[in-house]
């Protein structure tokens, strides 16, 4: 009996994949669009703080719970379980299903009648993103070779600044014109369309096609092996610690940025949303893309750039942001916030690039899920709660609209976390060169 033919690259895993594109560029564009929608659905809550706070009579602490921890709670529990499935099954199917689910949950936010129902809908958004997002970086890493991976991931990581702008500016404008419930409904539409596109128009890439792998290339390592690999890599540990602390600060500050502009300078909901979106998008986009491109270039000569560039940037971000939120005029505050946004997100692409390059292709979806789980719980979950709780603590007798002075103090204190994050990035440079040369 003749031996069976070897499976060719990009062999269709489903009948409809016969017509799917195998273009790395198309895959990157579509996955970036999906990730952007995920961030829109996550961030839109931030610019709707004031109208939702007013309608349900919430404290800043309760706002922090809905904006952060409610989203993170099941995201954390489901993320790793789904990622283990992604190591064995078609990842793009999971991405499509998850995108559909979180879009439905975003629409459900529009029908909330209380703090509890709104919190439950936000939990649903977290469930959908736990299913749909962890496999994205794994797919991109299999489409692009190691020397281009950080740059490709920098494009994927445009989702936060792009999502911040669209979610903030678009959400606030729609809320101003048609109410906050309509903002949630419209935000859900793109994800529903993209879920079908990713299922039918992107081919599943062969795992590890650009990596030098041994005989165990198709073996899925146990979860314990993934965690052990992450822990044994000195650079991974410190990059993860630094980026986690930075995400806590970033999520916390961004959750209340529009509210800060509303309370301190008297902008309308729409004006605050547009300004917050511009601050969090344009300079951040340049910072994310620039850091990915620059670190890839410098790292060809010295891989310590993956820790050094973000570390220095975060050291600058802390005092600039603290100075920004304490200014008395809106022009000075907005200008300094834009400068801070340029430097405060430069850690994203270098950290994610190193995370992918240090892990075996059959570990990448799981390690990404673990990283995102930590980001979601500590950054997205506790960051807004921390700033909200500090705001209430600094101004316990504030009006129902919230205190400007309490929020300013809370944001200024929180920025100190960037200094802590910077130390971890700088410590990662000690071993990063030798660890990137280790076999997968």
Image: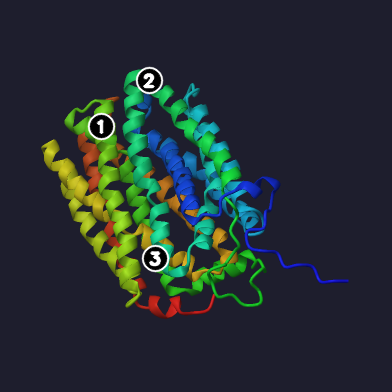
Instruction: Please tell me whether residue 354 is drawn above or below residue 276 in the rendered image.
Output: below
Residue 349, located in which quarter of the rendered image?
bottom left
Q: CA distance from mark 3 to mark 1?
A: 33 Å
Residue 165, located in which quarter of the rendered image?
top left
Q: Secondary structure at mark 2?
A: loop
Q: Look at mark 3 in the image and give the residue it sits on.
A: 239
Q: Look at mark 1 in the image and give the residue it sits on.
A: 272
Relative to the observer, which residue lies in front, 217 or 313? 217
Residue 242 location in percent, x, y? Answer: 36, 62
In the current view of this chain or complex, which residue is farthest to the right? 1
Say whether disc 3 or disc 1 marks the residue closer to the N-terminus. Answer: 3
Say whether disc 3 or disc 2 marks the residue closer to the N-terminus. Answer: 2
Q: Is residue 164 visible?
A: yes
Q: Quadrant of the N terminus?
A: bottom right
Q: CA distance from mark 1 to mark 2?
A: 15 Å
Looking at the image, residue 293 sits to the left or right of residue 364; the answer is left
Say whether disc 1 or disc 2 marks the residue closer to the N-terminus. Answer: 2
- What residue is drawn where x is 60% and y is 41%? 97
Q: Secondary structure at mark 1?
A: helix
- What residue is drawn where x is 37% and y is 53%? 247
Q: Quadrant of the C terminus?
A: bottom right
Residue 113 location in percent, x, y? Answer: 49, 21
Instruction: For the residues labelled 1 and 2, say whether their Cβ atoms are less than 8 Å apart.
Output: no
Instruction: Please tell me whether residue 351 is drawn above or below residue 31 in the rendered image.
Output: below
Looking at the image, residue 233 sits to the left or right of residue 216; the answer is left
- What residue is drawn where x is 40% and y is 50%? 379
């Amino acid at each position: 009996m003749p031996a069976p033919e070897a499976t060719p690259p990009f062999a269709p895993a489903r009948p409809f994949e016969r017509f799917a594109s195998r273009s790395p560029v198309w895959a990157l564009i579509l996955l970036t669009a999906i990730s952007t929608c995920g961030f829109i659905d996550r961030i839109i809550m931030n610019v709707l703080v004031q109208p939702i706070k007013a309608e349900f009579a919430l404290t800043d602490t309760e706002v922090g719970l809905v904006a952060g921890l409610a989203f993170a709670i099941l995201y954390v529990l489901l993320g790793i379980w789904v990622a283990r499935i992604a190591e064995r099954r078609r990842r793009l199917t999971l991405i499509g299903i998850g995108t559909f689910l979180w879009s439905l949950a975003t629409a459900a936010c529009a029908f909330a009648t209380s703090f509890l129902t709104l919190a439950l809908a936000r939990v649903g958004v977290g469930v959908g993103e736990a299913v749909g997002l962890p496999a994205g970086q794994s797919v991109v890493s299999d489409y692009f070779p190691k020397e281009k991976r950080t740059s490709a991931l920098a494009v994927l990581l445009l989702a936060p600044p792009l999502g911040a702008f669209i979610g903030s500016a678009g959400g606030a404008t729609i809320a101003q014109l048609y109410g906050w419930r309509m903002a949630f409904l419209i935000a859900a539409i793109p994800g529903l369309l993209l879920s079908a596109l990713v299922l039918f128009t992107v081919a599943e890439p062969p795992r590890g096609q650009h990596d030098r792998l041994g005989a165990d290339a198709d073996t899925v390592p146990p979860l314990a092996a993934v965690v052990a690999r992450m822990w044994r890599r000195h650079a991974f540990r410190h990059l993860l610690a630094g980026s986690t602390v930075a995400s806590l600060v970033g999520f916390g500050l961004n959750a209340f940025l529009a509210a800060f502009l509303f309370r301190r300078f008297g902008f309308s909901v729409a004006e605050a949303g547009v300004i917050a979106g511009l601050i969090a998008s344009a300079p951040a986009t340049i910072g994310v893309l620039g850091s990915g491109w620059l670190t890839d270039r410098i790292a060809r000569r010295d891989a310590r750039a993956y820790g050094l560039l973000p570390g220095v940037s975060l050291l600058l971000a802390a005092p600039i942001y603290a100075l920004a939120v304490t200014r008395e005029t809106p022009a000075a505050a907005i200008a300094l916030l834009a400068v801070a946004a340029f430097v405060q997100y430069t850690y994203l692409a270098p950290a994610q690039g190193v995370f992918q390059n240090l892990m075996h292709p059959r570990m990448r979806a799981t390690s990404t899920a673990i990283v995102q789980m930590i980001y979601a719980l500590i950054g997205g979950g506790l960051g807004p709660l921390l700033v909200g709780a500090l705001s209430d603590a600094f101004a316990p007798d504030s009006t129902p609209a919230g205190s400007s002075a309490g929020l300013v103090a809370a944001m200024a204190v929180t920025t100190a976390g960037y200094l802590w994050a910077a130390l971890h990035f700088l410590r990662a440079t000690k071993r990063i060169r030798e660890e990137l040369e280790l076999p997968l």
